[in-house]
Image (cartoon, coloured by chain):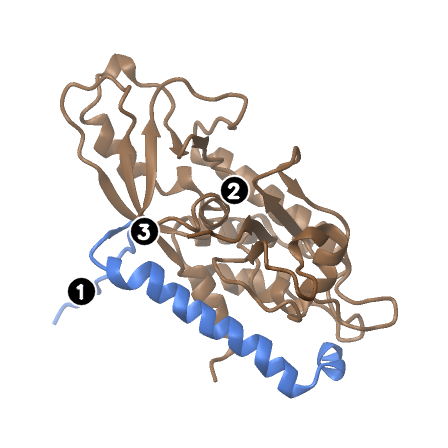
Amino acid sequence: QSMSLSVSPAQTTVWKRQIFDQLTERNKREMENFTHYEQAIEQSVWVKKGTM
Amino acid sequence: MADDKDVLRDVWFGRIPSCFTLNSDEVTEREAEPYYLMLPRVSYLTLVTDKVKKHFLKAMRTDEVEEMWFEYEGTPLKWHYPIGVLFDLHASASALPWSIIVHFKSFPDRDLLHCPTNSVIEAHFMSSIKEADVLKHKSQVVNDMQKKDHKQLWMGLQNDKFDQFWAMNRKLMEYSTEEGGFRYIPFRIYQTTGDKPFIQKLFRPVSPQGNPHTLCDLLKEMYPAALTNDGEQKRYQVLIHGIEPLLETPLQWLSEHLSHPDNFLHICIVPVPTD
């Protein structure tokens, strides 16, 4: 893509890695200690029943 | 190194632990326990709080119940802003879980829009997507979609279905290589001070000379006070989904990867916490 032509790979790595790392850190901070909390949106689970 | 697609998942599956407490002025028949819930950052408060409503209604006197609304430390929470934006803007410096007060009386008409049904949220969400597509592609992508495609975007958000949503949303993120990005970047910059709720203007992802615009370029033009000069102490945090991207991050990439499902890049500018 034309965007990447004027941005060197080394520079790209810095800002992108920083975003990856911060998201990981955010997830840890906001979610890790709260896994026992109820989720606001229930994920429906589909169970396939077969007849043998 | 992680893949760009992992960012989309992290954005979608971001959750904020919250503790809902009934406003102490509400008339109840019995004591209402607090309710703890993980809220999706990219959704809307009134879309994901059915359980909260049900929980507190059990304790309420039915003749005392009006439209439910939420407050954080005296600020009514606007349901039409994404949950993550409300948190980053008002509560990012506070301890978790996020403590939200639930009201069933005295709806603050001056501050909040009414939200009687989920179809109001759907209309708001779809109108934001359409507005974003006007900016990105002169409406071409949304107009080429069918009614069922629009529904797929909404149902994806409503039911927290990442794959269902992105199967359609990827079309809204396309652009031609020779253009180097969208026509304009759909963004909103929020601050807690000032008379306007947010800043939204036209801004291109690439300069007239063909250089990619960065987050720094956007802030320089829209909110220069958020930038720190050499030797100055940092006064503001620039938060997107609870993180502070480096100022050299290209805006086009941010728009493609850190936009909310409504296709806007929501940027919160908050004072650096002092503790």
Residue at 52 percent of width and 64 percent of height: B167
Residue at 72 percent of width and 53 percent of height: B224
- Residue B81's disc is 2
Q: Amino acid at mark 1?
A: Lys
Q: Which chain is blue?
A: A
Q: Is residue A47 above or below residue B60?
A: below
Q: Secondary structure at mark 1?
A: loop
Q: Secondary structure at mark 2?
A: loop
Query: Along the horizontal axis of the image, is B202 left or right of B165?
Result: right
Q: Could you tell me if residue B12 is visible in this image? A: yes
Badge 3: how crowded within 10 Å, few (<14), some, or many (20+)?
Answer: some
Q: Which quadrant is the N terminus of chain A positioned in?
A: bottom right
Colour chain B is painted in: brown
Badge 1: chain ID: A
**Hey, which residue is sitting farthest right in the picture?**
B209
Badge 2: chain ID: B
Q: Is residue B24 above or below residue B43?
A: above
Q: Amino acid at mark 2?
A: Tyr
Whole-angstrom CA distance, mark 1 to mark 3, is: 42 Å
Question: From the viewer's perspective, is the residue at label 3 or at label 2 nearer?
Answer: 3
* Dot placed on the residue nearer the N-terminal end, 3 or 2: 2
Badge 1: how crowded within 10 Å, few (<14), some, or many (20+)?
Answer: few
Q: Nearer the viewer, residue B119 or B259?
A: B259
Look at mark 3 in the image and give the residue it sits on. Answer: B96
Residue contact between numbered discs 1 and 3, judged by CB atoms under 8 Å: no
Whole-angstrom CA distance, mark 1 to mark 2, is: 41 Å
Across and down, in percent, residue A34 comes to 25, 57
Q: Amino acid at mark 3?
A: Leu
